[in-house]
Image (cartoon, rainbow, N blue to C red):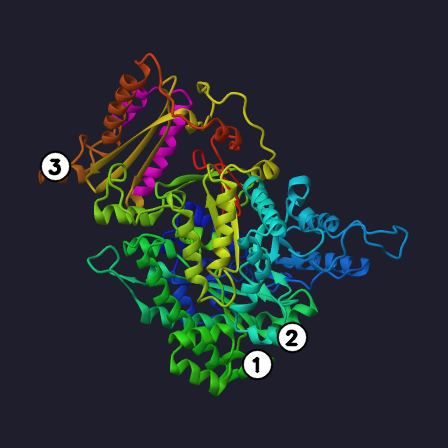
Amino acid sequence: MELKDWKLSQLGEDIWKKKYQNGDETFAQWLDRVSNGDTEVKDLIINKRFIFGGRILASRGVTDRKVTYSNCYVLPQVGDSIEEIYDTNKYLARTFSYGGGCGIDISQLRPKGSPVNNAAMTTTGAVSFMDTFNNTSQTIGQKGRRGALMISMSVNHPEIKDFINAKTQNKKLEQCNISVRTDDLFMTRVIAGDGNANDLMYKLAENNWDWGEPGMLFWDNINKETLLSEYIKNGEFEFAGVNPCAEEPLPAGGSCLLGSINLSEFVKDPFGERPVFNTPAFIRAVKIAVRALNQVLDEGLPLHPLQIQRDSVAKWRQIGLGIMGFGDMLIKMRIPYGSDRCSKLIATIGKALCNAGLQESALLAKELGMFEAYNEDYILNSFYMQSKIKDGVISDETINLIKTYGLRNSQLFTIAPTGSIGTMFGISTGVEPVYDVNGFARTTKSLNAEDKVYMEYPDIVHQAIESDDIDMLNNKPAYLIGAKDLDFMSRVKTQADWQQWIDASISSTLNLPNEATVEDVFKAYVLAHELGCKGLTVFRDGCKKVGILNKIEPKEEKSKPIQLNTIDTAINHCIAFGSKLQTGCGSLWMTVYFHKETGQLCHIFLNKGSRGGCNSYMVGLSRLISLAGKKGATVEEIVDQLNSVVACPSFVSKKATQSDISSGRSCADAIGRELLKLHEQFKCTYLNQPEIVELKVQDKIIAERKQCPECGAALTYTGGCISCFNCGWTKCD
C-alpha cells in the first residue's frame, strides 16, 4: 500500500509527512513500524477504522532518539518548598524533551504573604510561580512546537481569585492552559445563589467570556465516575491532576496512551434508505485496539522520561481508547447532532464500547496478569460499574470475565481532541460536529518553513450533497449542521451523553458565538456539572485571548480597494455569489467573491463532490483564478482564457444523451460562462446602485471582535488554534 491509496488531502498528506513519517521511510514501512507487524491493527489503520495517538505514530519503533510513546503526563502536585517547586520545573523540562506534555496542580502551595523561613520573610504566592513553569514550557522545543502544559488550582485555595485573573494580568502566560478545580459543595452553593460562591463563579465566567480562560474541572465528578472510585474513597488512590487537554485525570506520574476508533467507517449503507451502525464490526475493532494499546504500553515502559512515570504506569496501566468521526457518522446516518436520535445512538455505541473493552482487558489479565493494585471488590463496587449494572447495560459475560480473571487496566476509555489525526483523515474530530459544512481555507505555519494555504472541503458534506441532491443555499437539511450553527446547550448535552460511558474524561471545546453573554457561559458551566461532565472548556468567538496570543491590533482601514499586483485575501470586503453547475462528470459547486466597491474578482472556490483527480484539478484552478483576479486580471480576461479550453469528452457524451448539463463544452468553459453571468449580476445589483446596504451589526459586538491580521475578519478559536475562516489564517497555541 502507498500513501496515495489513503486519498488524503494535501493538508492530510503534509501532516503525515511532517509529523509521523520517520526520516525517508515509505508509507508501507511506516505502517509496519506503527503496527509492529500486527496484521489486524494494520488492517484497521489502512481502512481508517482505528488510529493510535500522535506520539505513538511518530515514536513507536524509533530507536535513535529519546522519545516517549505517551502524549501527556501528570506530575505530582507541586510541593510547598523551594526544592519541590524547582524539582517540578526540572521534571517538566525532562518530560517536554521526550515529547510529552504535562499537567500540574499548585493547590498545595501556600498563598501570597504567608511566612517563610528564609531571607524573603513572606512568600510571593502560588500564582507567582506560574511564570516559572510557563517559561520552561516555552523554552523546550518539540519538533516545531512547544511543550503543552496545564496548571490547575482548587477553588478553595486562598489565592483562587488571583489564579482566575492570572491570564488577564500577565501576558507572559501564553504557553499554558489554566483550569479551576471545583467540587460539588461549591457548585451547590453557586446554584443556591450563595453570595461568595456566586460572585466567584460569575468572575470565572466573566473572565472566560472575555479572555477564553480559565476552564473548569468538576473534581467530584472526576472522582466518582471512574473504575477507581472505591480506591479513592478508601485512600488508596488519588488523581494528581489532568493532562493539558484535560481528557485524562491521572495519578502522580501517570501517562495517557491514546488511540481512537473512527465511528464514521462503521456505518452500513451510508446515505441509503436505512443506514445503520455496524455494531459487531465496532466491537471487534474495540477488542483489537485494547490489546494493541496494552502492547504499546509494555513496549514503552522503559521509555518514560522519569522513574516515577515508569513506576506509575506499571502499577495502574491506564490506557485511553476513544472515538473520532462522530460528526461524520451522524451525517452519514442523517441524524441531527444533539437530537434524541443522537442520544440513543450514543447509548448503543457506548454500551458496546464499555462491554467489549472491559471483556478484552479481562482476557488480557487472564494471559498476562491483572494490574498491580487490582481489587475485585473495589472494581465491581465502583460507581462506574454499579451504575451500569443497575441499568442492565453491563452484560453477565462481562461481569463473569472480570470476576474470573480481573482486569489488566485500571482505566480504559477517554475521548481526546484528535485534531491532527482527524484532520489527516479528513474527518470530524473527537465528539465535535463538522466545524463548517461549507468548507474553508486553512493556513498553517507549524508544518512548513513558511505559510501555506490549504483549501479544505469536508468530504462528508459533498457525499451528502451528491447522495441527497441537497440545495445548500435554500434547503439545507437539519442533519447537515456545523459547529457554528449548533445550539451550544445541545453541545453540552451530547458531551454528557458520551461521558457516562467514559471512565476517564473528554476533551472538547464549546465554541460560543460572539454575541453570547457572560450569563450564557455561567449557565453552560452549571449545566455541564449537573449533567455529569468532568470538565468543560468554553471559548467565545472574538474574546481577548486572541489578542494576547497573537498581539493583533485592529486595522484602521476595514474596507479598501484591492491594489493591483498585490496579493490581498480580503474576503471580508467582498460580496459572495454561489452557483451549482452540472458538468459531464457530476455536480460542481462554485462560490465567487467580488470586491464590494470595485467589482474586482477576489476569490473563487470550486469543488466537485469527490476527492478524485477532477476535484484536485478544481482546487488548483480555484487558486489560479483567484491569483489572477488579485493580481489585477479583469473578469473578462479570465473568462476569455477559460472559454478557450477544448471540449471535454464527458460534456460531449452528456449532451449526446440530452442530459441536463450547464452551458459550455468543458468544466473550464462552463465556469467561465457562469463567472461572467455572476459578475454581470453583481454589477447590476451593487455597482449600479446609489448606495450599498450594509448588514446591521451591534456596535458593541463589532468593537469586541478580534480581527484577522490578513483580512480583518473575525477570528474563531477551535481545537487549540485561532483561525480565520474567511482567508484561512491560523495560529495554534
Q: Earlier in the sequence, mark 3 or mark 2?
A: 2
Q: Secondary structure at mark 1?
A: loop
Q: Is residue 234 left or right of residue 662?
A: right
The mark closer to the camera, 2 or 1, is 2
Q: Is residue 447 left or right of residue 433?
A: right
Residue 395 in the image, given as x and y percentages of width and height: 38, 79
Read off the residue under disc 1.
374
Q: CA distance from mark 3 to mark 2?
A: 78 Å
Residue 159 in the image, given as x and y percentages of width and height: 71, 51
Find out whether residue 625 is within the magenta segment. yes
| Amino acid type, callout 2 | Gly
- In the picture, the disc for residue 235 is 2
Judging depth in this view, the residue of 439 and 479 nearest the camera is 479
| Amino acid type, callout 3 | Lys
Residue 443 in the image, given as x and y percentages of width and height: 48, 39
Q: Quadrant of the N terminus?
A: bottom left
The mark closer to the camera, 3 or 2, is 2
Tell me which segment is drawn in magenta: 615-644
